Image (tube, rainbow, N blue to C red):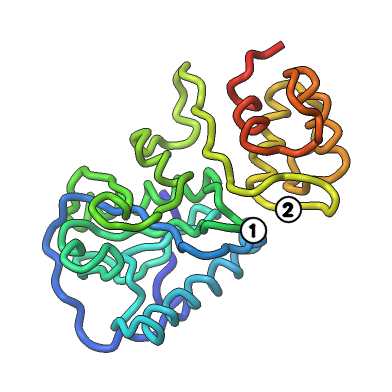
Amino acid sequence: MADLVSRRDWNARAPRGDYTQLDSTRGVKVHYTGGRVDPGIVGDHNGCVSLVQSIQRGHMDGNGWMDIGYSFVACPHRKVFVGRGLHHLPAANGAGLNVGHYAVLGLVGNAGLVQPPDGMLHGILDAIDHVRERGDAGKEIKGHRDGYATDCPGEALYAWVRRGAPRPGGGGTTPPETPPFPGRLLKYPPIMRGEDVRTWQAQMRTRGWELEADGAYGPGSRDVCRRFQRQQRVQADGIVGPTTWRLSWEAPMP
């Protein structure tokens, strides 16, 4: 179970008014930030705290909401921030849709940190277990885009939701599906950093290439990419684009 970060611990602002009571729901809607998330939060939990505070400011001062719109927020360190909490109507699902589901945010965006680390997926599922056990939530796990016109929760999180939101490391013999292409070309120079780089590097290590999964796409990553591309008989430009990304998971092992 994730560590619950109380509102006091993340220095939340007090809500402006009383919450609307939420007796029970059909389940949970999963969200992402919709903006750029600094990949540095993966190694710095203080960055997660600052980001959650920033989201609350945006919701209260920008949207005019009484509080942060989410019920709970999960970060890469398997910690779950209490937003509006149990039995309180969220605001993030969309007008007319909030009564049906709790709203759980994963701290990934549409740029920067786009691939949810395992700790974040565990945190989202821990939050879901929490609202089921203590908040009378049903079994549904949906994406924000289900029933509402939005890109949220992003391709990576939504693909995970569509797979049934499995826990990382759950075992089984079925190989993992190819993660969605992160939306940017991984190339050098200059050095590119991010969880998308780390995800690709880790997969290449799984395939037997000598490459450190340090999240930095530099000359070593470019060299491995070129050799892999030659092996797969595609253009050896050292750039991880959609084709090379897909082959990294789907090409037969040599």
Residue for point 28% across, 45% down: 141
Q: Out of 176 and 125, give the one closest to the viewer.
A: 176
| Res 65 → quadrant | bottom left
Residue for point 57% across, 63% down: 37
Residue for point 40% across, 71% down: 6
Mark 2, Cα crowd under 10 Å, few <14 / some 14-19 / many 20+, is some
Residue for point 35% across, 70% down: 83
- Furthest residue toward front: 235
| Res 62 → quadrant | bottom left
Q: In x, y percent, where is residue 128?
A: 31, 50
The kind of residue on which mark 2 rests is: Arg
Q: Is residue 125 above or below residue 228?
A: below
Q: Check disc 1 and report the residue beneath it.
A: 39
Q: Is residue 169 above or below residue 132?
A: above
Q: In x, y percent, where is residue 30?
A: 35, 53
Marks 1 and 2, Cα distance to the nearest angstrom?
8 Å
Helix, strand or loop at mark 2: strand
For residue 183, side relative to residue 169 (left or right): right
Q: Check disc 2 and report the residue beneath it.
A: 193
